[in-house]
Each structure stands twice: as C-alpha cells, then as structure tokens.
C-alpha cells in the first residue's frame, strides 16, 4: 500500500538527548545480535559480532555511559524522502527513497554518493537491504511494473534489474533477507492472499511462492510501504508480515521462509485504510515489537505499540504506548530491552522491551535501523538522514 501522508513537523530534532540509552548500553550482551548481523550472513555476522562486542565492552559502552547520545543530521544534498534504510555499520549505510534515489555513505555520513539506478527517476524506492558496502538490493513499489527489484555488487556503480512485476494486481511493499542468499519480498493481496517472492541467490533471481500456505486476507487488508519494515526476519527461517487497512490489524508469521503462515491479531488501531501495523522488529525468533497507528496528520493513534514474547502468536499492547503514529522500529544491538521507534512527529525510546515508551526527540523520521557495531541510523522526509552519536 502506498502511504500518501505529507508531514511538515519535526525539523527540530538536532541535539535532543536519548538519555536512557546510557543505562541500556551498560548491560550489552552478545546473544541479542539479530537484525543487521543476520543480514550480513554467517561469516560476516560472526566478524561483526566480535567487533561489536569488543566495542560494547570498551570504548562503545563507556562512551554511552559517559553522556547522552543524540541524533546528528548528516546532510545528503537531496530533498528525496527516504523510507528505505540499511545500516551496515557506523561508517556505512544505504538510503533509498523517492524520485528513484539511492544514496550510500562510507564515511559516517560526512559524504553521500548518489548511486541511483539509471532510468529509475520515476520510481519510488521504499526498501533497501545491504549485505555490506558493495552488495545491496533495492525495492521500488507500485502497481504493476512499477514494482521492481534492483541488485548491485559494486557499491551502486552498476545495477541489474532482477525482477519486474508483471501481475497488474500486485503491489510490492517490503523485503527482507535471512542471510546473504535467502530473502523474500511481499506484495499486497492478489486474488485474496498476500503474494510472496523468494530468492536463494542473493537477489539475482526471484520466484513467486505458492499461495496455498497463506491465510486469506481480510477485506481491504494490505501492508504499508512506509519504512521497509512490514516484512522482517530473524534467524535463518522466521519471517513476519505486518498488515493494516482492515477491521483488525494482524501480524503473519512463517517459520519456513514463507511457505506456510499463521496469522495473529495485533492490538493496534485498525478499522480504516490508514490504520494498522506499519513497522516490526524482532531481536530473535521470539521477542518482537510492533508500531503503527493512523498515518494521517492530526489523527490520534492510541495503543500504537505492542510486543510479543512468543514469536508473534500473541501480542500485548504497551502499558505506555508511543504517543503518536510511528512507522519504524529497531532494537539496539546487544540489548534485550532497549529499542527506538520513529515517525513524523518524533523518536521514542523503550528500555523495558516495549512495555513503555517515552519521546526523546521531535525530529521527523520514517525508518530506523541499527548495525552490529552499535551504528544506528534514521531517515525520512526532505533528505533527512541521521546517525545516533555518542557524546
């Protein structure tokens, strides 16, 4: 589903403290590394975990204890809206957005290279998954042939169009990778069920999976292409799909890389095409967070955050939820309890695994992602990209 909101608030996010992160970083533990480490693949993940653990035990954790981290805007030189984001490390990140724009930095955001695929100016990129600074897959959304997948292996110097949708009813929203080779992309329902693409060669080729293992979609149900987080994975086989726009918001789960799925209701506002679950994050195959609400400016979004401790079979609403619509969410690496949620009116922090949230920044962001070396990035409207900075 293409989200159509236009936001104007949130330009004052510079320098606002994320104070409670200091407490969480003091208890960093290596077993919690899922997200970006999974995306890196087994060999690189092990290396990333080792480096991140060393930093967490030394200068990294000490730096967080010594003061309050903050979002630091990194000028990109464009006014594109970035809803796709891949944090490889504190130095390397990819951002994908409107006007066919894909950017990459290799120096912590000091400089951004425009690596947009040729001829893509009319496309809307809403997701990007990166294995490192050279290899990435970008998803363009839209009806029919507007939905495409591009792949690069040389840092964006060249791109290969790996998939172009030929089904007029399909509208692809998000993608995720389990490792360097295996990944999925998902479309809004086609003939009553969500359509899933699968790759086993790092995004070189894609095939549509059988729909026999997919539960029927609700009337009016779809996913939101708002942050690249409506389809997320943890570990080698588990994947979750967020929905909205129907009578009930749901989260679908597959434990076999998208072949069979089960659906669970999520206690997040629904009952309207603008409401539902917009972003998911899992730190392992059992512990997950969901955020969403009503994306229309000025509309209330009560109960817009929930958490699961059983792999998505059941969801519990936050006792103190995010105060407004949020589209992106990410666990801090090596923490079992700390995560960030972002949206057009601010950033919220939880230090108790999603039971309660508090606003720590009023800047406008659509998506957030963290790398194994504690490099957390956020991106959004008007070319906004920021990195979480230690004091």
Image (cartoon, grey):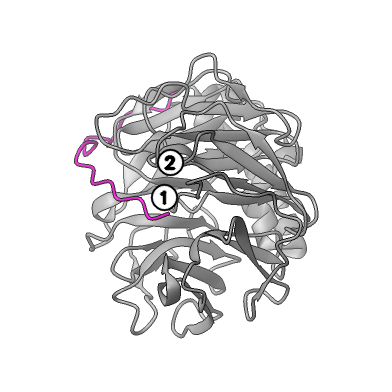
Graded by Cα atoms within 10 Å as few (under 14), some (14 to 19) or many (20 or more), the crowding at tag 1 reads: many
Disc 1 and disc 2 in contact, CB within 8 angstroms: yes
Query: Going by the image, does 176 lie left or right of 347?
Result: right
Query: Does residue 248 lie above or below 231 as drawn?
Result: above
- The majority secondary structure of the magenta stretch comes to loop
Name, please, the residue furthest toward the left. Answer: 8
Image location (x, y in percent) of residue 197: 63, 68
Query: Going by the image, does 11 lie left or right of 270?
Result: left
Graded by Cα atoms within 10 Å as few (under 14), some (14 to 19) or many (20 or more), the crowding at tag 2 reads: many
Query: Does residue 216 lie above or below 390 as drawn?
Result: below
Image location (x, y in percent) of residue 178: 70, 59
Q: How many marks?
A: 2
The residue positioned 49% from the left and 54% from the top of the image is 228
Query: Does residue 265 lie above or below 118 as drawn?
Result: above
Image location (x, y in percent) of residue 138: 49, 69
> Which stretch is magenta?
1-19
Image quadrant in which the C terminus is located: top left
Q: Is residue 301 magenta?
A: no
The residue positioned 73% from the left and 41% from the top of the image is 284
**Between disc 1 and disc 2, whose residue precedes?**
1
* Residue located beneath label 1 in the image: 226
The residue nearer to you, when weighing 104 against 257, is 257
CA separation, marks 1 and 2? Answer: 6 Å
- Secondary structure of the residue carrying tag 1 is loop
Q: Is residue 158 visible?
A: yes
* Residue located beneath label 2 in the image: 327
């Amino acid at each position: 589903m293409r989200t159509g909101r236009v936001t104007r608030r949130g330009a004052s996010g510079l320098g606002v403290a994320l104070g409670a992160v200091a407490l969480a970083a003091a208890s960093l533990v290596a077993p919690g590394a899922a997200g970006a480490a999974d995306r890196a693949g087994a060999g690189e993940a092990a290396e990333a975990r080792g480096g991140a653990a060393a930093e967490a035990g030394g200068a990294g954790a000490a730096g967080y204890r010594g003061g309050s981290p903050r979002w630091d805007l990194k000028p990109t030189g464009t006014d594109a809206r970035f809803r796709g984001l891949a944090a490889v490390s504190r130095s390397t990140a990819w951002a994908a957005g409107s006007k066919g724009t894909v950017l990459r930095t290799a120096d912590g955001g000091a400089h951004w290279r425009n690596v947009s695929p040729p001829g893509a100016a009319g496309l809307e990129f809403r997701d990007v998954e990166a294995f490192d600074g050279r290899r990435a897959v970008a998803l363009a959304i839209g009806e029919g042939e507007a939905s495409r997948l591009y792949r690069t292996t040389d840092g964006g110097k060249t791109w290969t169009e790996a998939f172009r949708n030929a089904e007029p009813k399909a509208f692809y929203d998000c993608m995720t990778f389990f490792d360097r080779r295996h990944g999925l992309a998902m479309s809004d329902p086609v003939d009553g069920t969500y359509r899933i693409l699968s790759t086993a060669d790092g995004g070189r080729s894609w095939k549509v999976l059988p729909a026999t293992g997919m539960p029927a979609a609700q009337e009016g149900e779809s996913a939101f292409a708002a942050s690249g987080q409506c389809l997320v994975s943890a570990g080698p086989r588990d994947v979750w799909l967020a929905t909205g726009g129907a009578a009930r918001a749901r989260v679908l789960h597959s434990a076999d890389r998208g072949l069979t799925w089960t659906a669970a209701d999520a206690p997040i506002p629904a009952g309207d095409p603008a409401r539902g679950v917009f972003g998911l994050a899992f730190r392992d195959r059992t512990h997950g967070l969901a955020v969403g609400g009503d994306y229309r400016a000025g509309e209330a979004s009560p109960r817009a955050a929930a958490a699961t401790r059983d792999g998505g079979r059941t969801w519990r609403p936050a006792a103190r939820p995010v105060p407004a619509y949020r589209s992106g969410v990410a666990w801090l690496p090596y923490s079992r309890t700390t995560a960030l949620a972002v949206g057009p009116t601010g950033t919220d922090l939880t230090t108790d695994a999603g039971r309660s949230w508090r606003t720590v920044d009023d800047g406008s962001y659509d998506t957030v992602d963290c790398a194994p070396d504690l490099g957390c990035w956020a991106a959004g409207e008007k070319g906004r990209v920021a990195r979480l900075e230690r004091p």
